[in-house]
Image (cartoon, rainbow, N blue to C red):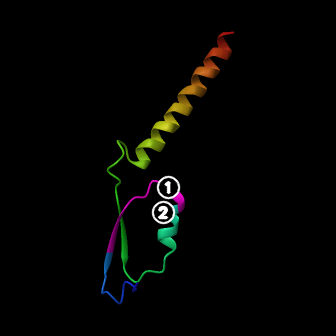
């Protein structure tokens, strides 16, 4: 198996991996070409949108918990 420079590869496009360890592995490779991560189309939401939804859920849970405690 040859290197990216041997095969004159100047750009590598990779779908955003589902797991963080594999994404980290790709970024640690010493490739002689540009690596572009494309959005993963297998998911309904982007990673950023999903993190925002989780944050809103946690925030809403804390508001409900505090509201319930103050009513008691």
Quadrant (top left/top right/bottom left/bottom right) for the N terminus:
bottom left
Position of residue 48 relative to residue 67, above or below, is: below
Q: Please say if the residues under marks 1 and 2 sit with CB atoms less than 8 Å apart.
A: yes
Residue at 46% across, 41% down? 52
Position of residue 53 relative to residue 26, above or below, is: above
Q: Disc 1 marks which residue? A: 19
Position of residue 29 relative to residue 6, above or below, is: above
Q: Residue furthest top?
A: 72
Residue at 35% across, 53% down? 40
* Helix, strand or loop for disc 2: helix
Residue 19 spot, x, y in % from top left: 50, 55
In the picture, measured across the screen, residue 9 lies left or right of residue 66, that is left
Residue at 48% across, 63% down? 23
The magenta span reads 12-21
Residue 15 spot, x, y in % from top left: 36, 60
In the picture, measured across the screen, residue 20 lies left or right of residue 47, that is right
Q: Disc 2 marks which residue? A: 23
Q: Residue furthest bottom?
A: 6
The quadrant where residue 61 appears: top right
* Helix, strand or loop for disc 1: loop
Marks 1 and 2, how far apart in space? 7 Å
Residue 25 spot, x, y in % from top left: 52, 68
């Amino acid at each position: 198996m040859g290197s990216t420079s041997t095969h004159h590869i100047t750009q590598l496009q990779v779908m955003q991996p589902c797991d963080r360890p594999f994404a980290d592995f790709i970024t640690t490779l010493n490739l002689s070409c540009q690596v572009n991560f494309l959005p993963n189309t297998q998911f309904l939401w982007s990673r950023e949108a999903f993190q925002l939804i989780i944050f809103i859920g946690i925030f809403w849970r804390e508001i409900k918990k505090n509201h319930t405690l103050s009513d008691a």
